[in-house]
Structure formats: structure tokens, C-alpha cells
Image (tube, rainbow, N blue to C red):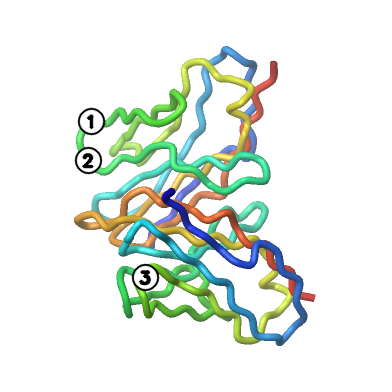
Amino acid sequence: AQSVAQPEDQVNVAEGNPLTVKCTYSVSGNPYLFWYVQYPNRGLQFLLKYITGDNLVKGSYGFEAEFNKSQTSFHLKKPSALVSDSALYFCAVSNDYKLSFGAGTTVTVRA
Amino acid sequence: EAQVTQNPRYLITVTGKKLTVTCSQNMNHEYMSWYRQDPGLGLRQIYYSMNVEVTDKGDVPEGYKVSRKEKRNFPLILESPSPNQTSLYFCASSSRLAGGIGELFFGEGSRLTVL
């Protein structure tokens, strides 16, 4: 069975500060890893994915994530957060064609 | 415009009254799937389909049915809805990659309330 853990329900940061949203996973085989974002009252949007290759993945809106196989982690990062980054963030893992999401982390960026 | 379209967007129904939520994509994607979103639980996969006439259970399939008769459509059927199926539902599609799926394109969501 595969699973995803997002240990923080909420992350609060000041605008301009670095933002990190944590994700750890459990899966057999080589994982496909994803981050998605959900803005208030809207659907979900793809941010970035890791399939293979460079452990540092760059995605949309200035976000990046680092795949760490030994720690089974895939943390999302942004060097300088914006108020508009306030949203609900989901980490997801896929092995074969089944996809599992974490419970989500609410990010609030204060001005 | 590439999109995934779900209908209805909002629905209030009563226990036991069969309903269908339609989902259609225009990107020629092989992979389609359904999720429900509940507070504190994130998104949980209900069913997925890797191609026409190929469907499989996700993590929470009980009480739901799906079919994939055409590549573009993947309806979700609740034969006898119950209040615990009150939730926000998302349909999504993706291209298939070797060994897995690519990025998901989501519909706008369907908010279902079962009284």
C-alpha cells in the first residue's frame, strides 16, 4: 500500500520569507511524486512532478521541490513567499496507476 | 481550450435516489479518475480508468460505480446515495507515461449533498 503524510496542517509565513511545505511518502518501487495547489473556491492545479533524474524539480509560480530517496521526502519550497501563495497544498504519490494524496497543508502568507 | 468538464456542479438529493455525475475531457487522455475531497482527509481516489473499458478501484470505491465506454467520458454513478457520500467530487484526466501517469488536469468540482 502507498501513502503520503503532510505533517503540518497549517504553515504561516510572512511575505518575502522562505516557504517550506513538508511531505513524506511510503511506496514500493520507484515513485512518481506530485504537488498540487487549490486556491479558495477553485479546482486543483498542478505545480510540479518528479519522475526521474535531477532530485531538484522546478515548477510553476517559482516553486521547487527536492526529492530525497533516503528520507522518502518530497518537500515543496519557495525562496520568497507572496500573499497570493496562500492556498491549500497537496502532495501526491503514484505507483503504477494508483494515486494517493496527502491530507493537505493550508499555507497562509501574511503581508 | 483543454479542459475537464463536470456536471452538475452543485446537487442536493435525498437518500436512495440514483444520480450520475458526468465527466468529459477534450485532451484525448487515456487516464481518467474520480476523487472525493473531505476536510482533514485530503483527496481520496474512488475509481480510475487506464483506457476504454478498463477501470479499477481506488481507495474508497464502496457505493460508487463508473464506466468508460468512450475515451472522453467517465461518469460517476451513485446507485443509492447515502448521507456519508456528501462531499466535493473531482474528476481528473492525464496522459499515461511508462510506468505511471503524468500531471492531472482537474475539473471544477461537483458539490454533492445527500439528505
Q: Position of residue B62 (x, y in %)?
A: 55, 79
Q: Residue furthest right?
A: B115
Callouts 3 and 1 on one subunit: no
Relative horizontal placement of residue A53, taking residue B45 as reference (left or right): left
Write down the quadrant of residue A9 in the picture: top right
Q: Position of residue B83 (x, y in %)?
A: 74, 75
Read off the residue under disc 2: A52
Host chain of mark 3:
B
Q: Position of residue B21 (x, y in %)?
A: 58, 72
Q: Are marks 3 and 1 in contact (CB under 8 Å)?
A: no
Relative horizontal placement of residue A81, taking residue A41 as reference (left or right): left
Q: Nearer the viewer, residue A38 or A90?
A: A38
The residue at the point 50 percent across, 69 percent down is B46
> For the residues marked 3 and 1, what is the alpha-carbon distance in whole angstroms?
30 Å
Classify 10 Å Cα crowding around label 2: few (below 14), some (14-19), many (20 and above).
few
Q: Residue furthest front?
A: B1
Question: Comparing marks 2 and 3, which lies closer to the viewer?
Answer: 3
Q: Nearer the viewer, residue B11 or A36?
A: B11
Read off the residue under disc 1: A54
Read off the residue under disc 3: B49
Seen in the picture, residue B1 relative to B36 is either above or below; the reply is above
| Helix, strand or loop at mark 1 | loop
Host chain of mark 2:
A
Q: What amino acid type is highlighted by mark number 2?
A: Thr
| Helix, strand or loop at mark 3 | strand
Q: Are marks 2 and 3 in contact (CB under 8 Å)?
A: no
Q: What amino acid type is highlighted by mark number 3?
A: Ser
